[in-house]
Amino acid sequence: MSVLAAIAVLAVLIVVHEAGHFAAARLQGIHVNRFSIGFGPVLWKYQGAQTEYAIRAFPLGGFVGFPDDDPESEIPENDPDLLHNRPVLDRAIVISAGVIANLIFAYLVFVVQFTTVGVPDGFNYQPGVLVPQVMQESPAAEAGLRSGDIILAIDNRELGSSETAIQELMQTIQNSPNESLDLTVQRGTRQLDVAVTPAPNPDGKSRVGVELIPNGTVEYRSPNGVGEVLTLAAQDFQGMFVRTVQGFGMLITNFSEMAGQVAGPVKIVEQGAGLVSSNANSLFPFTAIISINLAIINILPLPALDGGQLAFLLIEGLRGKPLPNRIQENVMQTGLVLLLGLGIFLIVRDTTQLEVFQQLFQ
């Protein structure tokens, strides 16, 4: 069920993103002839008064179609309500609406979390330290650690049930460069031994490539009114947004070191499933952070993404006329091929790193 929940999150976020484009166009009276969730063969469709709504076979994607790109459309080329005939600002609103929708949705996720689950009010510590994420191609990944694992002991020293467990684990790892450390790990109902060798960093502290959070359950109380819910949601959203932007900045400035940590949909589902299986409430921050990531990725000025189309609009605004269609089509097609290639590469790589897949070939 945790895997299905993670897949459902991705599907919902895609619907939210495409619904943003769709709503921004329709509210401005711009023609929209298709709204599809997924890619590939059509599983179900409904023809509305103006728009065909469809669900397709592969749910991790979607698109909003405009008559501008439909050679069979009967709408005249000079119709003022075609997207390409609208002013630059109108088109920019439509293109950026998907990103805005994802950011708003992430904030609302926190609002729902504080309203339904409650406001954090203490922590009930359990033995060990939880590993919510394992960096790809890191010593931890090579040793076999997985998202959702709980590290109970290191070199036969139990970490115990306290707030100092993470600090003790981190200090041992940081002070043991190139030394094999024996970890006792809880994975579901199984307990296993994992040997990991921390890699030294230039700062003198070694790393294994994992995120660590306390193992246990958060204690909650009812919120003190709507004001507290909205304020806490804004604080959590701001903090997560800033950390995500900083993460993208590190990826750009240290691409050679960070490239291995880029995750595709398979890895995202695996990490989400690991978090949800250990704590169902983790579905809320998982949904929010993926929604924020989706927004930031789409706003990057890369071909075939929303940011790439906004870059074309910016050039058009500065030139007073759009770039020739041939140039735009070539750039967009090249970008689409590169993105599809990257997507396939990430899916294949992440699939081959799944524990179930590796066990098949042992």
Image: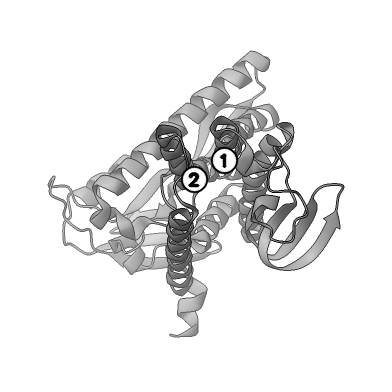
Residue type, numbered disc 2: Gln
Q: Quadrant of the C terminus?
A: bottom left
Occupied quadrant, residue 250: top left
Please determine whether, in this image, residue 264 is positioned above or below residue 360: above
The structure residue drawn at horizontal position 35% and vertical position 52%, both measured from the top left corner, is 210
Q: Residues within 10 Å of mark 1 (few under 14, many from 20)?
A: many
Q: Is residue 185 left or right of residue 84?
A: left
Residue linked to disc 2: 309
Q: CA distance from mark 1 to mark 2?
A: 7 Å
The structure residue drawn at horizontal position 74% and vertical position 34%, both measured from the top left corner, is 29
Residue in the foreground of this view, choosing between 252 and 196: 252
Q: Is residue 285 visible?
A: yes
Q: State if disc 2 and disc 1 touch (CB < 8 Å).
A: yes
Residue type, numbered disc 1: Ile
Residue placed furthest toward the bottom: 361
Q: Quadrant of the N terminus?
A: bottom right
Label whose residue precedes the other's in the sequence (1 or 2): 1
Residue in the foreground of this view, choosing between 102 and 320: 320
Residue in the foreground of this view, choosing between 263 and 155: 263
Indicate the position of residue 347 as horizontal and vertical percent values.
48, 68
Indicate the position of residue 345 as horizontal and vertical percent values.
43, 69
Secondary structure of the residue carrying tag 1 is: helix
Q: Is residue 23 left or right of residue 150?
A: right
Q: Is residue 163 visible?
A: no
Residue linked to disc 1: 95
